[in-house]
Image (cartoon, rainbow, N blue to C red):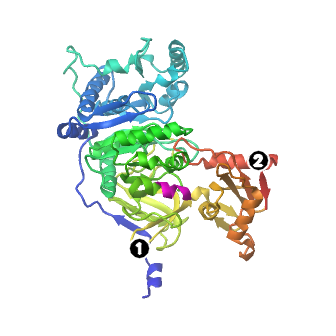
Amino acid sequence: MSAKELQKNTPSYFSNPHKTPYVYRTIPDAVQNWADLRPNTAAVVVRDLGKPRQLLTFQQLARDARVFAESLVRVGLRPGENVALYVRNSAEWMVGFCGVVMAGGVAVTAMSYHPGTCVRAATEVNCRFIILDIREAQRLQDPHLLDDDIQAQCNTHNFDTKAIILVQNSPKSRRFMGFSDLVKRTDDTAGQVTLPLLDPDGICLMFPTSGTTGKSKYMLHSHFAIINGSKAVADRVGLSPGDVFFTDRAMGYSGGFPSYVFSVGITMLFVQTMPIPSTESVEFLMSALKEEQATSGFFPPYLLFDLARLDSRSDEKCSKLRKVMLGGQVLQRQMFETLHRFAEKPVCIYGMSELFGYFTTKPGENILPKEELTYLPCEGIQVKIVDDSDNVVHVGTEGEICIRSFSLSREYFGKDISPLLDSKGWYHTGDMGRLTKCGHLTISGRRKEIIKRGTFIVYPAAVENPLRDHPDVEEVYAVGVPDVRLLEEVCVCILPKQGSELTVECIRCFAEQVFQPALSPDKRGLMPGYFFIMDDIPRLITAKVNRRELKQRCVELLKSRSGREHVA
């Protein structure tokens, strides 16, 4: 049988079995383990421009979390109850999370800290308590008026004000509990509370998704999945005790969740970066990485863009990181040069909030801008590719990526939400890709982002990637807009490089040279029907492009016939 015939008879399935023993412990047990082994080592360091540096050792974390857990039990928290953790990156977040879990609660994290919406959001997921950080809001509003706003929210949503725990330096109101009061051990309270016995398979965390489907959903994760899933990633990348791992992501989101603190015992360095970058913020980031002796980290591509654009000498101010993970958005061409200035062993990752584990490029592999990246699953992950009828396709055939793993979330929270896993335990990611017989996975794009133009299916990436080669293009995204005749038409949104004078006519001519529509069977091929030069690109809180909003913008522009669009 020839290689081609063999490929046609080989199903697109690959399994990377777990080769190292699982760690069967809870997160509080893991914290105490590292506190015994490395008591004076920092578990987390938090750096924020213009604010004091925060450092929490493993010993401090274990001690303060236990006191906080005892306080929560004392004020009425029962095992299995949800506790909203609406706190910015801080030592208080770490103590709050570990304390909630140690008390038997389920920590519900959030990517929004607006006091006006926090109570409503917490009641939607049946939270018993809310730990709320209002320190930023206090700078903009009188503390007493802010207290009134929170009180009004509690009244509107029938939430007990006595179940609000405020994180602030000096509470002026006694209407709510103070976080600092609950982490203070006193002689009359020490040892009076018995904490519940925890199960490693028990649920301890509820994560929100990034909202790419329009509304965030909450996923349930167990101690076992968090510790072993993140440990498999750490083993793949080479993280170990002694590493200082940088991230700028929120602790309450999968990209910034401090799982490596629990699974590997490393120090995680959280540096707050600016939504609108400046030379000052880049200087601060570089100084923090150097002063904290960062050895590894997660670099979203937009950070590489900021470093390349705002400080060409930034690599001189920061020693090279040995291990760097990248993911979350498309790597633009100019980011690759910056990447190799900062990272000895860059690794691109493919993952999702539903999974505590990643697919990664091969560590040490040279990542080039024009090459199609291939990913291998970390230990404990199975992957298959299926067609629209849920049948496994042959190797090399494009289809939907499905994943099965011990580190997958068990379910989404709520009654009116479709199941996360199918009847056989597979998670349908909604991403399209191809798989080789050796398990190398290539990502094509989102299934729901597919553009159906007439009888042809157009993948956004197939349009976007060639257009990125234009020297004046910073970012490019293709979306489908309604078309009476073809059902959908391809609409390209271009964010030009700063200072460039890119025009619609220029990018249209470039596209015609690249796609050569006249040579295609339908005389269109991948040639877009509409072009827009955009001043900005809408994004989710995770920094990914918000394609739903981008598509809506295009539809509105086409309806009004305003803006700088071009109809081919």
| Residue marked by disc 2 | 557
At horizontal 45% and vertical 17% (from top left) the residue drawn is: 161
Q: Residues within 10 Å of mark 1 (few under 14, many from 20)?
A: some
Q: Position of residue 65 (x, y in %)?
A: 28, 29
Q: Earlier in the sequence, mark 2 or mark 1?
A: 1
The structure residue drawn at horizontal position 47% and vertical position 83%, both measured from the top left corner, is 4
Task: Where is residue 364? Give x, y as percent.
Answer: 37, 63
Q: Quadrant location of the C terminus?
A: bottom right
What secondary structure do most residues of the magenta stretch adopt?
Answer: helix
Front residue of 423/197: it is: 197
Q: Which residue is mark 1?
A: 437
The stretch in magenta equals 332-338
Q: Residues within 10 Å of mark 2 (few under 14, many from 20)?
A: some
Say left or right for 393 vs 360.
Answer: right
Question: Above or below — where is 450 with respect to 310?
Answer: below
Q: Residue at x 24, y 37 (%)?
A: 41
- Is 334 colored magenta in this rendering? yes
